[in-house]
Amino acid sequence: MSDRTPFETLADAAERYGELSLENYARIRSLAERISAGFCGYLRGNSPHRCCYLVPPEGNWAPADFRSGAFSVSGMRFLPLGPIQFGLAVRVSRTGDWMRLVLTAAKNGEAMDVHVAQGETYTFSMPLDDAEMTAFFAHLHSHLVDFFEDQSRHYEHGEYGGGGGIGFDFMEAGAERDSAPDTDEMPPRAKGG
């Protein structure tokens, strides 16, 4: 017979859950950071301008580094073990307009699924493969371009396309001053033309 108490069994289970939830968050955050940096490189080519930031998936945001605040689990006292959302701010104009895409990442066996709001789900093998990342960046690019092209086509044919179901929202150049995170840890905001 075991000398273990029911509490010890419960504590062991909770400890295992906590370790796995931290592992899940670390894997998703690492993937999100790679998506942000890689997609910016994909978009800008040789341009020095920063064009992607990780931002909160809901609420106020600005094109700035939100660090852990960019994830749906931010501010929770208890880190849940499950899918995690994050926002990806993408510069979409030469004048500094930005859009926020919302992505959800979830473990799928040994792989990681990333779902683009109002879009498709992509499965990434682990460790991450550069070819998979490039294909995903091409999809994100098409997702954004298709939105603008579809809306323009609708207008040219005498109607408005709606636009509410594409999975992102806009921020005009200059509006970020009212929505940037209020923290001393923030680096200076990127400037670009």
Image: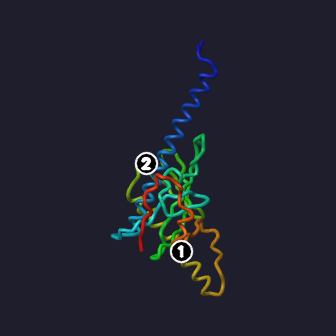
State the image quarter where residue 50 is shown: bottom left
| Amino acid on which disc 1 is placed | Asp
Q: Residue at x 47, y 45 (%)?
A: 26
x, y (%) of residue 118?
Answer: 60, 64
Number of the label disc, if any, that sits on residue 126: 2
Q: Residue at x 51, y 74 (%)?
A: 145
The crowding category of the residue bearing disc 1, from other C-alpha atoms within 10 Å (few below 14, some 14 to 19, many at least 20), is: few
Residue in front for this viewpoint, 89 or 153? 89
Q: CA distance from mark 2 to mark 1?
A: 29 Å
Which residue matches tag 1? Answer: 146
Residue in front for this viewpoint, 131 or 86? 86
x, y (%) of residue 167?
Answer: 59, 65
For numbered disc 1, what is the local secondary structure?
helix
- What quarter of the picture does the N terminus occupy? top right
Tell me: residue 185, above or below residue 51.
Answer: above
Tell me: residue 110, above or below residue 85.
Answer: above
Contact, mark 2 vs mark 1 (Cβ under 8 Å): no
Q: Residue at x 64, y 21 (%)?
A: 6
> Which dot, 2 or 1, sits closer to the camera?
1
| Amino acid on which disc 2 is placed | Met
x, y (%) of residue 32?
Answer: 47, 54
Number of the label disc, if any, that sits on residue 38: none
Tell me: residue 29, above or below residue 36.
Answer: above
